Amino acid sequence: MRLLSILVAATLAAPAGADPAERIVSIGGSITEIVYELDQQHRLIARDTTSTFPEVALDLPDVGYVRALSPEGVLSVNPELVLAEVDAGPPEALAVLKEAGMPLVLIPDDPTAAGILEKIRAVGAALDVDAQAGALADNVAAQLDRTTARANAVAEGERKRVLFILSGEGGRILAAGRNTEAATVIGMAGAINALDGFEGYKPVSDEAIVQAAPDVILMMTRGGAVMVDNDALFALPAIAATPAGENRAVIRMGGQYLLGFGPRTAQAVQDLADALYKEQAHDSGGL
Amino acid sequence: MTLAAYDESGVADLPDRTVVARRLTLWLGLLLLATMTGSLATGAASTSLWAAFGDLAQGRALSRVDETILWNIRLPRTLLGALVGAALAVSGAMMQGLFRNPLADPGLVGVSAGAGLGAIAAIVLGAMLPAGLMASVGTYLVPLAAFAGGWVTTLVLYRVSTRGGRTSVATMLLAGIALGALAGAVSGLLVYAADDQQLRDLTFWGLGSLAGATWGKLMAAAPIILLALLGAPFLARGLNALALGEAAAGHLGIPVQRIKNLTVLAVAAATGAAVAVSGGIGFVGIVVPHLLRLASGPDHKTLLPNAALLGASLLLGADMISRTVIAPAELPIGIVTAILGAPVFLWILLRRRMVVDL
C-alpha cells in the first residue's frame, strides 16, 4: 500500500495548487499517519504527543498533547498550516492560533470505517493533494470492504466473544463497553464485544467478566511493551474462569495500530480477524 | 501551637525584623519586576521582547504572529500568573494566621475541593447543556463552575462551623476535611461517568496550567483577586492579634468574629478565582509564607504584602520553566510547583523539628 501511494504521489506531484503550505504541524496520531501515507512528510515540521507512527515521526518536535496544546509552542515552530483533530484543544489555545492568523484545519475524527475515509480526504484537501488522497481512500476502502465481507462470512454461531482490556494493573480490570473504538474494531473483525452493558472504558467487576464469558482477551501493547504478561493475566481469578482463561487465548496489538482509526486500521482489523479465526483452526487440535 | 513557640523566639528581635521585612519588600518588588520582564521575554517562540521594543520605537509594525505572541499570549499569561501566585500565597498566609496552624492552606476551607468538583462537573456534564447556552458560555463554563463550586463549599462550611454568631476554627478545620472528602467522592462519581476524552481533560485540569490565559480570563479573575489582595492588609492587625488566641485578641479590642468572616471571604474569593483560571496549583500557599516567616518573622503587616510579591515571582518563575523545559510542548505548572515545593516543604518541616518537635 505504501509503495502504491508513493507511485501515485510521484505521478501526481507536479500539478500542485498555488503555493500550498509547506510548513505543517500535524496534531493527531492518525492525521500524521495519513500525511506519511500521502508521502507529504517533507512538509511536516512538528507533531503532537499522540503522533508516534511511523517511528521517524518521533524525530519531529513535539508541541504537546492533543488536548493540552500551548499556543506559543505551536507558533514557535513557525508553521504555515496546522492540521488538527476536531477534539484538539483547549479551545482557548485554538482561539489564540486563529487570532494570530494561523491557518487551522480541523479534521473530522469519526471512529468508523466511513470516518477513516472522510479523514483521509480531509487531510488530502488540506494538503492540496486531493488526487493522492482519493487514491489512498479508495485503496483503504477496498481493504475495509474485504474485511467487512470476511467478517460477514463468519457464521452467527461461530462469532468469538472478545473482551478488550485497556489496563489490568494491580488486578483491576478496565474494559471496553459499548460505543468504544475497541468495540467497533471487534465488530469490524466479525466478533462480538463481550461487555455491552455499559458505555466507554470502565472498571468492571470480576463477576461481570465471568458472566461475559469471553473466548478471547484483546489487549494493547505500548511501544512494543506488554503491560500485563500472560501469566499474570491468566492468574487473575476472573479471567481464569472464562473460556479465554481456559484456553489461554490472548491477542495483543499496538494501541495506535488497533484503535487509531487511520490508514492502517483495515490491516489491523484483518490481523485481528486472522488471530481470532485462523489460529483457532490451528490450535483447536493442540489445545 | 508550634507557631506560638516559634513566635516567642522571634519576639526579642522584633524591631530588627520589621526593618528586615521592609527591606525585603523592596527586594521582592524588584524580583517581581524582573520575573515579569523575564516572563514576557521567554517562551517557546523565538519572538524577542527587545527586538519588538526596538521595532515599535522606530515606528515599525510588528508581524501578526509576534504581536499575538507578545500581546495575546505572554502579556495576559504574565499578568494572570502574577495574580494567581499572589492570590495563592496571600490566601495561604491568611489561612495559617486564622487557624494558628503553620500547615493550613486554602485547601482547608474546602475551596480547592469545591472548585475541583465544580470544574469536573462542568467538564463531564457540560455536554448535556443546551447548545445555545454552551455557545454563549463556551470556554468560560469550567472556570465559572470552579469558582461557584469553591464558593458554595466555603459558604456551607462556614454555616456548619458557625453557631450563635461565633465561628469555631477547630470545627471548620475538621468539617473542611469532611467536606473535602465528600467533594472528592462526588468528583469520583463524575469521573466514573466521564468518557475517554473528558478523563484526559480532567487529568490536565488537575495538574494546573496558565496556558489558557487570555485577556477575557484575566479580566474576569483580576477584579476578584485584586479586591481580596488589596483588602488583605486591613486584616493584618487582626490576624496578628489572633496569634495570641481568640480571647486575648478580643481583650485587645479586635473584632474577632469580623476578622474571621472577612478572612474566610477573602481567601475563598482569591483562591476560588485563582483555581478557576489556572486549575490545581499546589504548594505556593504553604511554601511562600513559610519562607517569609523564616526570613522576617510572622508580622502579618509585612508578611501579607511580601507573600503577594514572592508568590507572584515564584509562580512566574515556575511558569517560565513549565513552558520552556520541554518546548514546544508544555509541562503542567502544577507539576513544577510541586516538584520545587515539596522538597522545600520537607526541609521546612525538618528545620522546625529542631526548634520544637511536631
Image (tube, coloured by chain):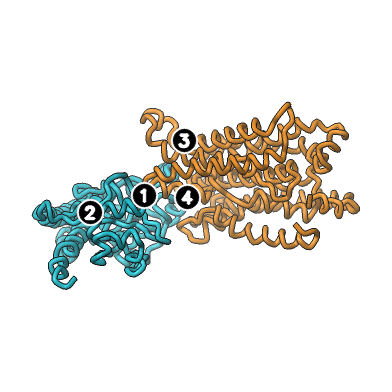
Chain colours: A cyan, B orange
The C terminus of chain B, quarter of image: bottom right
Q: Secondary structure at mark 4?
A: helix
Q: Residue furthest bottom?
A: A286
Disc 4 from disc 1: Cα separation: 20 Å
Q: Secondary structure at mark 3?
A: helix
Q: Of tags 1 and 3, which is closer to the observer? A: 1
The residue drawn where x is 76% and y is 31% is: B257
Chain that bears disc 3: B
Residue A31 x %, y %: 29, 54
Using the rendered image, report if marks 2 and 4 lie on a common chain.
Answer: no
In this view of the protein, which residue sits in the foreground, B58 or B261?
B261
Mark earlier in primary sequence (2, 1): 2
Pointer 2 residue: A185
The residue drawn where x is 68% and y is 34% is: B161
Task: Give the label on residue B204, or none.
Answer: 4
Q: Of tags 2 and 3, which is closer to the observer? A: 2
